[in-house]
Image (cartoon, rainbow, N blue to C red):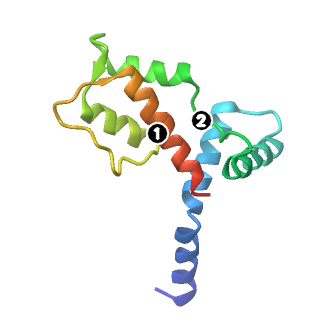
Amino acid sequence: MAAGEEQSREYLRRHRLPELLQHLGALLLFHRPERPREFLIQVLERVKAGRRAEGEYPDLMDEANVEAMFSLLDVLGQGHITPVQYREALKTLGLSTEDLEVGDDENITLEVFKEGVKKRMLESWAVY
């Protein structure tokens, strides 16, 4: 691999640019704003404010979306899902499953699911 290409890859990795662009693209597709450039500027301003603890980070999914996702996973309506389903849902959302402390025999309730998704969404923005 050429030195320039390696430096470019390192730059992207160090600044987590692929993840940032993925987040921004997902927000664009979710919200479909009439003025995408202005929307992206507002999102980046919210990220900046969130880092300074002066505001909240942008949400890809609101509470109703998270609840809907949980209900799709809880097909029998038991009020819980398995740890495997939980991990896969987090991965599907592009969220980290590192340091996920869930036992294989543990049931994941809607509240645990919502708290976990919200926590990991906040963590995903906090690195920028």
Residue 107: x and y, percent?
24, 25
Residue lying furthest left in this view? 105
* Of the pair 40 and 5, the residue shown nearer to us: 40
Query: Residue, x 49% and y 25% (percent of image)?
Result: 66
- Position of 106 relative to 45 (above/below): above
Q: What's under tag 2, amino acid-wise? A: Leu
Image quarter of residue 110: top left
**Disc number at residue 64?**
none
- Position of 124 relative to 92 (above/below): below
Residue 34: x and y, percent?
81, 33
Q: Give the total number of marks visible in the rendering.
A: 2
- Position of 123 relative to 115 (above/below): below
- Position of 9 relative to 53 (above/below): below
Q: CA distance from mark 1 to mark 2?
A: 9 Å
Query: Residue, x 58% and y 75% (percent of image)?
Result: 11
Residue 35: x and y, percent?
83, 38
Q: Are marks 1 and 2 in contact (CB under 8 Å)?
A: yes
Kindly identify which residue carries mark 1: 93
Kindly identify which residue carries mark 2: 60
Residue lying furthest top in this view? 77
Badge 2 density bin: few <14, some 14–19, many ≥20, Cα 10 Å? some
Image quarter of residue 33: top right
Q: What's under tag 1, amino acid-wise? A: Leu
Element assignment for label 2: loop
Query: Residue, x 64% and y 39% (percent of image)?
Result: 27
Disc with the residue nearer the chain's start (1 vs 2): 2
